[in-house]
Image (cartoon, rainbow, N blue to C red):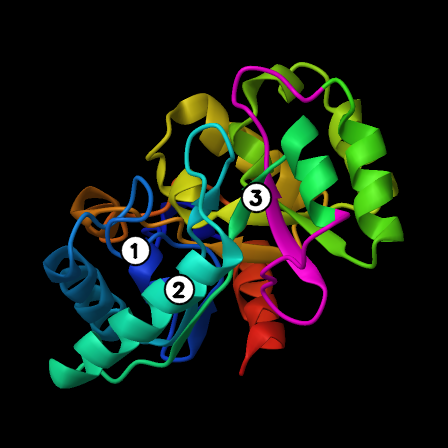
Amino acid sequence: MFSFLKSKPYLKDLLGGNYIDIHSHLLPGIDDGAKSISSTERLAKSFQEMGFSQFITTPHVSHYIWNNSREDIIDNHKATKLLLEERNIQIPFQAAAEYFMDDWFETHFQNKKLLTLKDNYVLVEMSYMNAPVQLYKILFDLQVAGYIPVLAHPERYLFYHKNFNEYEKLKKAGCLFQLNLLAVAGYYGNEITKTSEQLLKKGMYNFAGTDIHHSNHVAAFHQKIKIENTNALKEVIANNQFFKF
């Protein structure tokens, strides 16, 4: 009867002891995430402290900004894994990528093998300013090439907030959705929190990710969530078990 008086949980407490993260930027010096192995070490320790069982780190691949090759990411991951093990950080992790959808990307995936989250599941993003002109062609061609697109943080694309039908259209086009968990704690602002709750209520999210770049992101996981639909959020978080390796 008085459930509305219950205090909302802290975001970190919803992750339990077996959460598998599928979106972060922990590889050192490769994008706008960790700048050094010391930063990587601090972030990885935070993952351990919050009870993550595994994680997949996903450096940006954007030809015009972060021109990371598949080989560069694999080599960085191998070196980072060894360095963390030397520092007694044992949390298992793999490396994939977060691909920026543009004209270069469409040519790239038709000629080069992508780094995927698992099997043929590939993490993609787009500009926060506007969607690519050829967005639906890119998504179609990506699937023809054998991949399943997982769209990072759909709640953060402001240009869709007043045209919610576009989210439905993306789902019908075969796009899976990955929630940025910090959105439900208000980190990106109230409007994005509200949109994340709407998408949760409609059951449109498939997976969840931290998108952690730095210590400020980690600190925000110690905030209480600002949405009401905790059960839907827990279900989306649990879906990440699909990526267990």
- Asked whether residue 125 appears in the rendered view, the answer is yes
**Residue at the spot x=49%, y=51% of the render?**
69
SS of the residue under disc 2: helix
- The crowd level at tag 3 (other Cα within 10 Å; few <14, some 14-19, many 20+) is many
- Name the amino acid, label 2: Leu
Query: Counting residues from the N terminus, which is met first, the one under dot 3 or under dot 2?
Result: 2
Q: Are marks 2 and 1 in contact (CB under 8 Å)?
A: yes
Foreground label between 1 and 3: 3
Q: In this rendering, is residue 207 above or below 189?
A: below
Instruction: Give the CA separation, mark 2 to mark 1.
Output: 7 Å
- The crowd level at tag 2 (other Cα within 10 Å; few <14, some 14-19, many 20+) is some
Left or right of 137, for residue 133 = left
Query: Counting residues from the N terminus, which is met first, the one under dot 1 or under dot 3?
Result: 1
Q: Residue 99: which numbered mark, if any?
A: 3
Residue 183 placement (x, y as % from top left): 43, 39
- Name the amino acid, label 1: Tyr
Residue at mark 2: 14
Give the total number of marks visible in the rendering. 3
Which span is picked out in magenta? Answer: 110-132
- Asked whether residue 203 appears in the rendered view, the answer is no
Instruction: Give the CA separation, mark 1 to mark 3.
Output: 30 Å
Residue 23 placement (x, y as % from top left): 46, 55
Q: Residue 10: which numbered mark, if any?
A: 1
**Residue at the spot x=36%, y=79% of the render?**
17
Q: In this rendering, is residue 149 above or below 194?
A: below
